[in-house]
Amino acid sequence: MKLAKRLFDFYLDASIHVAFAVLALMEVTAILLNITIDGHLKFFVFFGTLTAYNFVKYGVEADKYILVANRYHKNIQFVSLIALVIASYSAFYLNINEWYLMLGLLFLTGLYAVPFLPRTKNLRNLAGLKIFIVALVWAGITVVLPSFEKTTVIPWDVAIETIQRILLVLVLLVPFEIRDLKYDDATLKTLPQRFGVHKTLVFGGFSAIILYGLTFLKEDLTPLDAIAKGILFLILGHIMLYTKKEESKYYASFWVEAIPIFWWISILLVEIGI
């Protein structure tokens, strides 16, 4: 049992879980926009996400990421290096425009973690910007990148899907913002710090309503899309109703981050039924 718990904690701490979540959202995009995603791009996104998230979490402090002292962080470092190698190999199969788009997203991710000017804060620490930077990057990777240069997609529908993905990530980040309320520096001015837990949950619920409503503005709205967004709306509504200031250790880090994976699986099941 202890071994299983250690492996599970490593699965979360090494960002493998969040990498699966990002890949799941990319697969959702492929289904809803009826496009095919190249296998190399999937590998690049999965392993690139793993590497990038570990850099954001541990890379800012060299003694946690480069000059590693303990075995646990060495193992995370080793997994990150392997992931970086695989992502770099897969990157060679991306076309030049995909490279430009990814470089822009990677640059934004870098600014999120590393100060961009001497004696300045990184974007992660600029008041109120953190969740919007994360949402923008996730939407870019999971919607814009896979649909980029696909001639079969309707640009308006891609724009709607991108906005919906931004809103989805903002809602999913609410439990994390509430969880970290007691740890975050007051200068961060996160949503719970500014408006309190209740109003932050109301913001999440209102965002979920907008997300679902935008579905019906698509030019090529399929029954699968409407059902899929309906399922997502119910899941997000449940999360906003039952998220509390004090939650279990794995509530946000596993269950909330698993929502994209569960959503993808539910869409596959609905697709089989239809």
Image: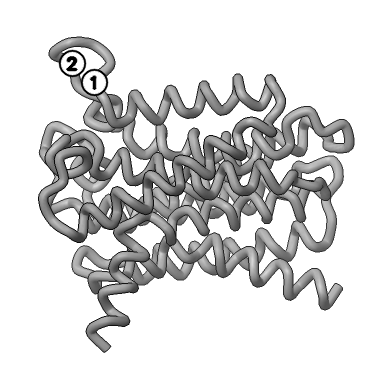
Q: Few, some or many C-alpha atoms within 10 Å of disc 2 (few <14, some 14-19, many ≥20)?
A: few
Q: Which residue is mark 1?
A: 115
Residue 150: x and y in percent read 82, 33
Is 52 left or right of 77, judged from the image as shown? right
Front residue of 177/46: it is 46
- Residue placed at 40% from the left, 63% from the top? 240
Q: Amino acid at mark 2?
A: Thr
As drawn, the label of residue 120 is 2
Q: Are marks 2 and 1 in contact (CB under 8 Å)?
A: yes
Q: Residue furthest top?
A: 118
Question: Is tag 2's residue or tag 1's residue first in the polypeptide sequence?
Answer: 1
Q: Residue furthest bottom?
A: 1
- Residue placed at 53% from the left, 44% from the top? 86
Q: CA distance from mark 2 to mark 1?
A: 6 Å
- Residue placed at 38% from the left, 44% from the top? 81
Quadrant where the image shows the C terminus: bottom right
The local secondary structure at tag 1 comes to loop
The local secondary structure at tag 2 comes to loop
Q: Looking at the rendering, which quadrant does residue 109 occupy? A: top left
As drawn, the label of residue 231 is none
